[in-house]
Amino acid sequence: MTDQFNQNRLTEATSPYLRQHMHNPVHWQPWEPAVFAEAKRRNVPVLLSVGYAACHWCHVMAHESFEDAEVAALMNAHYVCIKLDREERPDLDDIYMTALSMMGEQGGWPLTMFLDPDGVPFWGGTYFPKTPQYGRPGFMQILQELARVYAETPEKIARNCKALGEGLRARAAEDARGDLPPDLASRAARSLSAHIDMAQGGLGAAPKFPQPFMYRFLWQQAQHADDANLRDGVLVTAMHICQGGIYDHLAGGFARYSVDAAWLVPHFEKMLYDNAQLIDLLTRLWRTTKNPIFAARIDATINWLMDETQLPDGGFAASLDADTQGAEGLFYIWTPTEIENVLGDETAVFSEAYGITPDGNFENRNILNRLHAVDAPDAHHVEAALNGARSALLARRNTRPRPARDDKILADWNAMTITALAHAAQSFRNETWRALAMRAFDALQRDLSETVKGRKTGRLVHSARRLDKTVHQLDVCLAADLVHAAEAAIALYQVTGTPAYLQTAIGFMGALDAAYADTQRGGYFENDDGLEGLLVRNRNVQDNAMPATNAVALRVFAALAQLTGNMGYAERARAIATALAGMLAQNYPSMTSLLEAITTSHNLATLVICTVPDDAATEALVRAASQHPIVDLLIVELPPDAELPRGHPAHAKQAVGGRATAYLCPGQQCLPPVHEAEKLIAQLDDLILRRQTDRSPTR
């Protein structure tokens, strides 16, 4: 073995997750062709371990096995070992997680996969204890047995590799075209809604994930169908998420998921993408309900973003760890005595409001929650009266050892956050949030723009981390980064009217077309056409923790068609729908983002408000529009010196008579201009009614 591979090479990594493992006795290697060549030279398999910095069970396996000299000796002797940060390479994680599902195993992290020297998987799992327990085999046993089989009966390994490799290639090459039933969206919404737990919210039993993209789809369908049952299913879920322990009632922000059916006990890690999507969903719900709980959760969660995830140069960190000092959730939980020491005479009132009991609700301690007040009419007033108590407890909590923060910048996650901030800023008329979104977008373009030979390519690298004033970029560009960044640019164009944002969005989508298009079947690959070392090149078409890349691409193309009048963008949107229609008809529960995007593309309207500076009538018009319940509407606040693209139906239209003027443009036609908020509201109400009357969202 060469010296290069006879050591742990993660000291060279910038990923916080990889650096968590740089002192392991395992000879960890990065993902690179030379590592697979070394496995081929030694004639040993590759052990691929995939995780992320905030992952509790990743930490458990690290402490039990990867820090253990006995386990490391087995790994080093019989394998070439790769450690991968799934957040840096979600494309690779998707390939091997798919392989695991083909084996009939449930996915999760850490992902533990065994590959041949060509990168083809032959066996795998998730977390394994060092020795047999929890009904799972011991990792040491697995290491020894697989090494023996690989050496003594290589034909068994070859058979497994052949089966899994062919399965992965068949899936990647699947032709998803077909016919899209015209009533699919409405049928899908009713079917999914029937599975919502109307007592506690969410789908099915524990664990429960927020899945904001699915509830966004249901909310859209509820309006188009005027369906109270759909609305109720979304609202009962949102209220339980907002009042449960999955929400941090002291600092704001949401944990990744709930391990129980009641949304009480979270998996304590906080991820940027979850919070971005929940801010955006709650903003949509607030526009209809004006529920002060939703407004409070949005405000607190944005404050949490600023306080705990915002990086000095404007971007947002990826996550906060689930663990503190080796214990899950320790930073967040309380004993009654700890609360009394801080609150004194207020303890009884606070404990009643936040479910504090002597026995606790989590490992003899308490997770703050308001689940008993989900339906209480005075819930917001009770919370407001306890602002001081929460602040005092937060100050005390901040003296505890803090969860680790993964401070790398991910392009798609940051873009999703920018979009949510811009939408919230527009709806709540909050200049601080707008400035925050603009600053973060500047950071996105500065720190994540791909540069080749000193020139910017127009693409974004997926991940970067700033260390010692130097930005270290990962040399990988993914389609998800481009489509989410384009959507963020469109959101900023709407709230500022600055044409440069719209042009930036057009540029990102042009880069998508240039290097990611599947010219044979339609849609877009996740990886560009020049990336080497992939077992397969997948299209991201099904929702996971985030909406599918192709769904977001369709949504963005539809928006660009509406904003520019260029019907070439509309054709690109239709082409994505056509390319995936057959799969969508069969797999709609995992493709609700695509159904929502297709519905949007058939209903989208633009509202252009020609503004007048420092004008009360302008503010009244914008507020009436941005706080109206209507979905599938792009609101553009156009300053006096800005001009719409030539193809837009409202191009060259201006503020009439020096007064703020609104032009509502369904499709490529504009209604008569209005100046008064009441008349604009009437136009928007009428558009909702017309959509409900003529419902064929997937025709």
Image (spheres, helix red, strand yellow):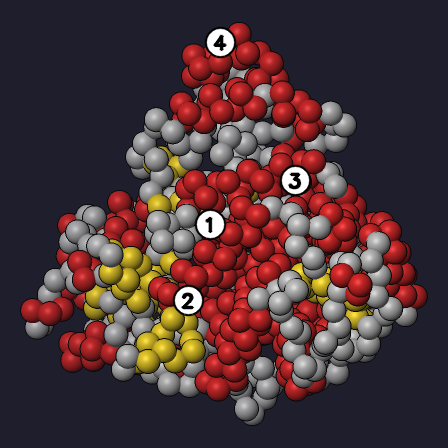
Marks 1, 3: nearer the viewer:
3
Report which residue position mark 4 lands on: 344
Mark 4–mark 3 CB contact (< 8 Å): no
Q: Which mark is residue 295?
A: 3
Q: Quadrant of residue 293?
A: top right
Q: CA distance from mark 1 to mark 3?
A: 20 Å
Q: Secondary structure at mark 1?
A: strand
With respect to residue 22, does 574 lie above or below? below
Q: Amino acid at mark 4?
A: Gly
Q: Which mark is residue 445?
A: 2
Residue 150 x %, y %: 26, 73
Report which residue position mark 1 lands on: 271
Q: CA distance from mark 1 to mark 2?
A: 22 Å
Q: Is residue 245 visible?
A: yes
Q: Residue furthest left?
A: 3
Mark 1–mark 2 CB contact (< 8 Å): no
Task: Using residue 397 as the reference point, say whether residue 239 is left or right of it.
Answer: right
Q: Which residue is at the front of the view, 599 or 89?
A: 599
Task: Using residue 506 as the reference point, say whether residue 54 is left or right of it.
Answer: left
Q: Secondary structure at mark 4?
A: helix
Dot 1 or dot 2: first in sequence order is 1
Q: Amino acid at mark 1?
A: Met
Q: Quadrant of residue 236?
A: top right
Task: Using residue 17 as the reference point, say whether residue 555 is left or right of it.
Answer: right
Q: Secondary structure at mark 2?
A: helix
